[in-house]
Image (cartoon, rainbow, N blue to C red):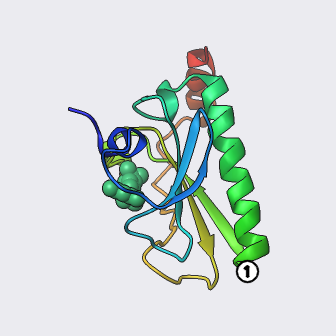
Amino acid sequence: MKDVFCRIIEGELPSTKVYEDSDVLAILDVNPVAKGHCLVMPKAHFQDFLSTPKDIVHKVFDVAQRIGQAEISVLGAKGINILTNVGEKAGQSVPHFHVHVIPRYVAGEGGFQLTMNAIDSSTLDLPVLASTISKGLK
Ligand code: DGP
Protein backbone atom coordinates (compact mmCIF):
# COMPACT_ATOMS: atom_id res chain seq x y z
CA MET A 1 0.00 0.00 0.00
CA LYS A 2 1.21 3.51 -0.81
CA ASP A 3 2.32 5.64 2.13
CA VAL A 4 0.56 8.92 2.85
CA PHE A 5 3.37 11.05 1.40
CA CYS A 6 3.32 9.12 -1.89
CA ARG A 7 -0.42 9.80 -2.02
CA ILE A 8 0.17 13.52 -1.39
CA ILE A 9 2.90 13.64 -4.06
CA GLU A 10 0.61 11.94 -6.56
CA GLY A 11 -2.18 14.41 -5.77
CA GLU A 12 -4.51 11.83 -4.23
CA LEU A 13 -4.48 13.67 -0.89
CA PRO A 14 -4.36 17.41 -0.25
CA SER A 15 -1.45 19.25 1.31
CA THR A 16 -0.30 22.79 1.92
CA LYS A 17 2.73 23.19 -0.35
CA VAL A 18 5.68 25.36 0.56
CA TYR A 19 8.05 24.33 -2.25
CA GLU A 20 8.03 21.97 -5.20
CA ASP A 21 10.39 21.02 -8.00
CA SER A 22 10.83 17.90 -10.10
CA ASP A 23 12.52 15.96 -7.28
CA VAL A 24 11.46 17.53 -4.00
CA LEU A 25 8.25 18.52 -2.26
CA ALA A 26 7.97 20.54 0.94
CA ILE A 27 4.66 20.81 2.79
CA LEU A 28 3.38 22.06 6.12
CA ASP A 29 3.10 19.30 8.71
CA VAL A 30 -0.55 18.50 9.44
CA ASN A 31 0.35 18.20 13.14
CA PRO A 32 2.76 21.10 13.57
CA VAL A 33 4.76 21.38 16.75
CA ALA A 34 5.58 25.00 15.90
CA LYS A 35 4.29 27.66 13.48
CA GLY A 36 5.84 26.82 10.09
CA HIS A 37 6.79 23.20 10.84
CA CYS A 38 7.63 21.83 7.38
CA LEU A 39 8.31 18.40 5.96
CA VAL A 40 10.73 18.14 3.04
CA MET A 41 10.69 14.91 1.06
CA PRO A 42 11.81 13.38 -2.22
CA LYS A 43 9.06 12.77 -4.74
CA ALA A 44 10.47 9.33 -5.44
CA HIS A 45 9.76 6.80 -2.73
CA PHE A 46 12.59 5.87 -0.39
CA GLN A 47 11.92 4.37 3.01
CA ASP A 48 14.20 6.61 5.03
CA PHE A 49 17.33 8.77 5.10
CA LEU A 50 19.67 5.78 5.20
CA SER A 51 18.25 4.15 2.09
CA THR A 52 18.01 7.29 -0.04
CA PRO A 53 20.62 7.90 -2.78
CA LYS A 54 23.08 10.67 -1.92
CA ASP A 55 22.11 12.96 -4.79
CA ILE A 56 18.50 12.91 -3.60
CA VAL A 57 19.56 13.43 0.03
CA HIS A 58 21.53 16.48 -1.10
CA LYS A 59 18.52 17.91 -2.94
CA VAL A 60 16.23 17.37 0.05
CA PHE A 61 18.68 18.95 2.49
CA ASP A 62 19.29 21.86 0.14
CA VAL A 63 15.57 22.67 0.30
CA ALA A 64 15.50 22.07 4.06
CA GLN A 65 18.36 24.56 4.48
CA ARG A 66 16.61 27.17 2.34
CA ILE A 67 13.33 26.75 4.23
CA GLY A 68 15.18 27.10 7.52
CA GLN A 69 16.81 30.29 6.27
CA ALA A 70 13.41 31.63 5.15
CA GLU A 71 11.84 30.83 8.49
CA ILE A 72 14.51 32.87 10.25
CA SER A 73 14.15 35.78 7.86
CA VAL A 74 10.40 35.93 7.21
CA LEU A 75 8.80 34.18 10.19
CA GLY A 76 11.15 35.60 12.77
CA ALA A 77 12.19 32.19 14.07
CA LYS A 78 15.06 32.37 16.52
CA GLY A 79 16.33 28.87 15.78
CA ILE A 80 15.60 25.78 13.69
CA ASN A 81 15.61 22.08 14.47
CA ILE A 82 16.37 19.79 11.54
CA LEU A 83 15.25 16.25 12.24
CA THR A 84 14.85 13.05 10.29
CA ASN A 85 13.69 9.90 12.02
CA VAL A 86 14.88 6.52 10.78
CA GLY A 87 12.75 3.56 11.80
CA GLU A 88 9.85 3.13 14.18
CA LYS A 89 12.16 2.83 17.18
CA ALA A 90 13.41 6.33 16.37
CA GLY A 91 9.88 7.69 15.99
CA GLN A 92 9.44 7.41 12.21
CA SER A 93 5.71 7.05 11.59
CA VAL A 94 5.61 7.61 7.81
CA PRO A 95 7.93 5.23 5.88
CA HIS A 96 8.92 7.78 3.24
CA PHE A 97 12.13 9.76 3.78
CA HIS A 98 11.35 13.23 5.06
CA VAL A 99 13.14 15.98 6.94
CA HIS A 100 11.35 18.00 9.60
CA VAL A 101 12.23 21.70 9.54
CA ILE A 102 10.96 23.07 12.84
CA PRO A 103 11.24 26.78 13.56
CA ARG A 104 11.79 27.68 17.20
CA TYR A 105 10.61 30.93 18.71
CA VAL A 106 10.78 30.38 22.45
CA ALA A 107 12.87 27.70 24.14
CA GLY A 108 10.67 24.80 25.21
CA GLU A 109 7.60 26.07 23.32
CA GLY A 110 5.21 23.63 21.67
CA GLY A 111 5.17 19.87 21.54
CA PHE A 112 8.77 19.31 20.59
CA GLN A 113 11.26 18.89 23.37
CA LEU A 114 14.78 17.94 22.46
CA THR A 115 16.34 16.10 25.36
CA MET A 116 19.41 13.96 25.27
CA ASN A 117 19.38 11.60 28.21
CA ALA A 118 22.83 10.12 28.57
CA ILE A 119 23.09 6.36 29.10
CA ASP A 120 25.55 4.87 31.55
CA SER A 121 28.66 4.69 29.40
CA SER A 122 30.98 3.45 32.12
CA THR A 123 30.74 -0.13 30.82
CA LEU A 124 31.44 0.85 27.21
CA ASP A 125 34.90 0.46 25.72
CA LEU A 126 34.90 3.68 23.72
CA PRO A 127 37.99 3.00 21.52
CA VAL A 128 36.59 -0.45 20.60
CA LEU A 129 33.18 1.08 19.93
CA ALA A 130 34.66 3.80 17.72
CA SER A 131 36.75 1.25 15.84
CA THR A 132 33.72 -1.04 15.31
CA ILE A 133 31.68 1.80 13.82
CA SER A 134 34.65 2.95 11.73
CA LYS A 135 35.09 -0.52 10.25
CA GLY A 136 31.41 -0.58 9.31
CA LEU A 137 31.70 2.51 7.11
CA LYS A 138 31.15 1.89 3.39
P1 DGP B 1 7.69 11.07 11.46
O1 DGP B 1 7.09 10.69 12.79
O2 DGP B 1 9.11 11.58 11.59
O3 DGP B 1 7.53 9.94 10.47
O4 DGP B 1 6.85 12.31 10.95
C1 DGP B 1 5.70 12.19 10.19
C2 DGP B 1 5.02 13.53 10.21
O5 DGP B 1 4.09 13.55 9.14
C3 DGP B 1 4.22 13.84 11.48
O6 DGP B 1 4.76 15.01 12.08
C4 DGP B 1 2.81 14.10 11.01
C5 DGP B 1 2.97 14.29 9.52
N1 DGP B 1 1.86 13.81 8.71
C6 DGP B 1 1.29 12.59 8.79
N2 DGP B 1 0.29 12.48 7.88
C7 DGP B 1 0.26 13.67 7.22
C8 DGP B 1 -0.55 14.18 6.18
O7 DGP B 1 -1.45 13.53 5.64
N3 DGP B 1 -0.30 15.44 5.77
C9 DGP B 1 0.71 16.20 6.33
N4 DGP B 1 0.87 17.43 5.85
N5 DGP B 1 1.48 15.75 7.32
C10 DGP B 1 1.26 14.51 7.76
Asked whether, in this view, residue 36 is left or right of residue 77, the answer is left
Of the 4 image quadrants, the one containing the N terminus is: top left
In front of the other: 95 or 25: 25
Residue 99 on image: x %, y %: 54, 49
Asked whether, in this view, residue 86 is left or right of residue 39, the answer is left
Q: Residue at x 62, y 85 (%)?
A: 106
Task: Tell me which corner region of the image, top left, top right, bottom left or bottom right, holds residue 10.
Answer: top left
Residue most extreme to the left: 1
Residue most extreme to the front: 11
Q: Residue at x 64, y 82 (%)?
A: 105
Which residue corresponds to mark 1?
76
Helix, strand or loop status at disc 1: loop
Task: Tell me which corner region of the image, top left, top right, bottom left or bottom right, holds residue 129.
Answer: top right
Q: Residue at x 44, y 70 (%)?
A: 32
Q: Residue at x 56, y 22 (%)?
A: 132
Q: Quarter for ligand 1? A: bottom left
Location of residue 49 with respect to 123 vertically, above or below: above
Q: Is mark 1 within 8 Å of ligand 1?
A: no
Label 1 environment density (alpha carbons within 10 Å; few <14, some 14–19, many ≥20): few
Asked whether, in this view, residue 75 is left or right of residue 111, the answer is right
Residue 69 on image: x %, y %: 76, 62
Asked whether, in this view, residue 109 is left or right of residue 69, the answer is left
Location of residue 138 with respect to 48 vertically, above or below: above
Of the 4 image quadrants, the one containing the C terminus is: top right
Location of residue 56 with respect to 118 vertically, above or below: above
Location of residue 3 with respect to 71 vertically, above or below: above
Identify residue type, mark 1: Gly
In front of the other: 110 or 59: 59
